[in-house]
Amino acid sequence: MSQKRPAGNSFGSLLAKSAKEAKRTAEDRPSSSATNSGNATNTNNPFLSRPTQPEEAIKLFLIQSRSTARRKGGTAAGPTNFEIEARLGTILSPYGQHDMRALSSGPKLVPIKGMNRVVHAFVCNVSGDSTATGAASTNFEGGITRSNYLKWTNSGLSEVSPLSLAFSCRGPSANRNESESAALRSQLNEVETVETVFAYPDKTRVAFPHHSSTSSSAAASMNGPQNSHLGRGHKERKEKVSTIDIALPAAPYDLRLTLATETPMKDDSVTTIQHLANGWNKKRIKRRRSYSRTDKSFAWRIDVTEVTSMDNIAGGASQQKQQQNESV
C-alpha cells in the first residue's frame, strides 16, 4: 500500500528540496579564490538565497495546489472553483529605488560549496511560508511592454508567432495544400471578450460582460462603454490561497503563480449597473483574447489582456492602462 504525503507539508519545505536539487544540477564551474572574489555574484542580495529550477518550482506549486484544492473541497453553498494563474511581470525590490527589479538582468554565478554555479531562477517570495519569516518581501508589478504585447500577439492566428509556438502547433500540411493560417486555426481557438469588473474591499467583485456587438470595438470598450452595452452582472468572491514569485533574471520578465478560489455569491445576479452597490474601490475594463488548443491536449489557456484600471478614492479617481500576458 502506498503511503500518502501528510497534508500539512508546507510548500516552503518542498521548495527547500527544489533549491538543493538546483544546487546539485546547476552547471558547475571550477574556480580559484581569485575567480570567486572577482566573478561570483554578490550574495549579499537576499533574493539570491533560494536558487531553483523553474520547471521544478512550477511542478511543486501545481502539486501543492492540487492537494490544497482536494482538502478545501467546497462549502455548504456549493463547490468552490479554484484557479491557478501564471502572470508575467516584474518583481520589485523593497530596497533603494522601489521601481528597481529585485535581481539585475542576466544569469547569476552563485558560490555553492566552493564552486561558482550558473543559476537562472530564484524563489523570492512564497505566501504563507513559515521558513521565510524575517525575509524581505517583494512587490510584483504585473504587465508587459506594448512592444512585446504586439510582438507576441499581433499576428493572431494568421501566421506562426511566439503564441502559436507556445502551444506546439504544427506547420501547414503539404499533402492537403493547407495555408499557414488554416493550419493554426484548425489547432487553436481564439475568443475575444470584454468585461467591466468592480472590486470591493471585502474581496467580492461584480463582473459585467459586454455584449458581443461591442466586443470588437476596442475604442468604445476602453474609453468607457455605455451602460446599455453591459450585460447582467455576476457577483463572486475571489480570495488568494497561495502565491509564489520566481525571479528570472536571464529573461525579460519574472513569474508569479497564484492559487485562488472563486466562490459565486448567493445574490450573484446584479441586473444592471444601476443596481450596483456603492463602496467599490477599483474598476477594471478588461479586453481579452483567449487562446486554447482545440484538441484539449494543452491543459492551460493563454489570456492576453489589455486592462484599464481606475481606483475609486475619496480624493478622486486615478486611472492607468497596462498590458498583461496571463496564462490561466
Image (tube, helix red, strand yellow):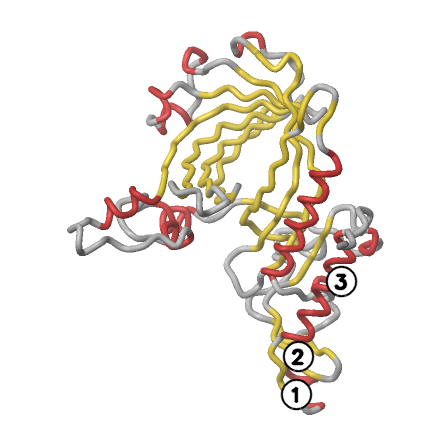
Give the Cα separation between the discs numbered 2 and 1: 7 Å
Where, by quadrant of the figure, is residue 293 drawn? top left
Tell which circle, 2 or 3, labels the residue nearer the N-terminal end: 3
Tell which circle, 2 or 1, labels the residue nearer the N-terminal end: 1
Q: Which residue is drawn at 71% across and 28% down?
A: 74
Where, by quadrant of the figure, is residue 194 drawn? top left
Tell which circle, 1 or 3, labels the residue nearer the N-terminal end: 3
For this view, does 31 lie left or right of residue 132?
left
The answer to the question of whether label 2 and label 1 lie on touching residues, with beta carbons closer than 8 A, is yes
**On the image, numbered disc 2 is attached to which residue?**
40
Q: Which residue is drawn at 17% across and 50% down?
A: 176
Q: Position of residue 302 (x, y in %)?
A: 46, 43
Three-letter code for the amino acid on which mark 2 is drawn: Ala
Give the label, 1 or 3, closer to the camera.
3
Q: Residue at x 69, y 57 (%)?
A: 124
Give the Cα separation between the discs numbered 1 and 3: 28 Å
Q: Where is residue 263 in the image (x, y as percent from the top left)?
A: 66, 25
Q: Is mark 3 on a helix, strand or loop?
A: helix
Three-letter code for the amino acid on which mark 1 is drawn: Thr
**On the image, numbered disc 3 is attached to which residue?**
16
**On the image, numbered disc 1 is attached to which residue?**
35
